[in-house]
Image: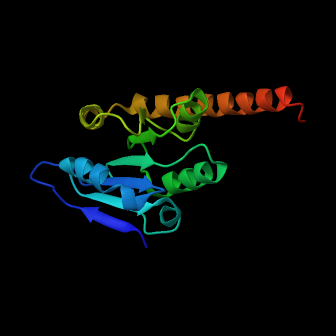
Amino acid sequence: SHVLRYDDAGPGKPAGMLLITDRPDESRDLARRLALWGPCTVVGLEQATDGPVTQPTIVVSDADLGQRRSVEAMRVALARHRSRGAPYICLLRDMTARSTIQARAIGATEVLPADAACSLLLQTVSQLLREEDGGDPARGTAAFTRAHLATAAVSLADMLESASAGKP
């Protein structure tokens, strides 16, 4: 089982982060960075679909969304662990338009390259935590709408790709 905890939490830090990854053995540095805001639990993508529910303050994923199986597993993991309105940062290894659309379709609040500078990741998490403190209910509705629009875009891209390849 790949569940690791990094606890650098201090006074005034949020109640936790969840990092869902398909490469838990390579995620220690990322988890330590995320632990600056509170306890960070690292869960392997396959374990995230059936392990205990965590309901973290922020969810971060580092998985290959180029594979349909990973996308479906991430969708299940997010439905299981992400509380309504909780920010979700999707780190992409391949920043193609398709991967970005896929990340938005599964509900990413922010999409960053997996190799983003530590300062960019820290800035993004800080910004999302500030927004979370603001308690803007319209933000959840906007994210929901963005996710549906992105799902439609992925479906259209799939249809166009199939048509160009001569498939039904």
Q: Residue at x 24, y 33 (%)?
A: 119
- Res 55 visible: no
User: In percent of the image, x 58 and y 27: which residue is there?
Assistant: 97
Task: Indicate the position of residue 50 as horizontal and vertical percent values.
Answer: 52, 68
Residue 8 seen in this snapshot: yes
- Image coordinates of residue 98 in percent, x first then y, are 61, 31
Question: Which one is nearer the viewer's eye here, 61 or 86?
Answer: 61
Name the image quarter holding residue 123.
top left
Residue 120: quarter of image? top left
Frontmost residue, 117 versus 37: 117
Q: Is residue 102 left or right of residue 27?
A: right
Left or right side of 93 for 15:
left
Tell me which residue sits at (55%, 41%) in the image: 106
- Tell me, what colour scheme is on the image? rainbow
Q: Position of residue 77 (x, y in %)?
A: 51, 56
Q: Is residue 93 above or below residue 127?
A: below
Q: In the image as oriented, which residue stretches furthest toward the left?
A: 11
Residue 130 percent across, percent down from the top left: 24, 33
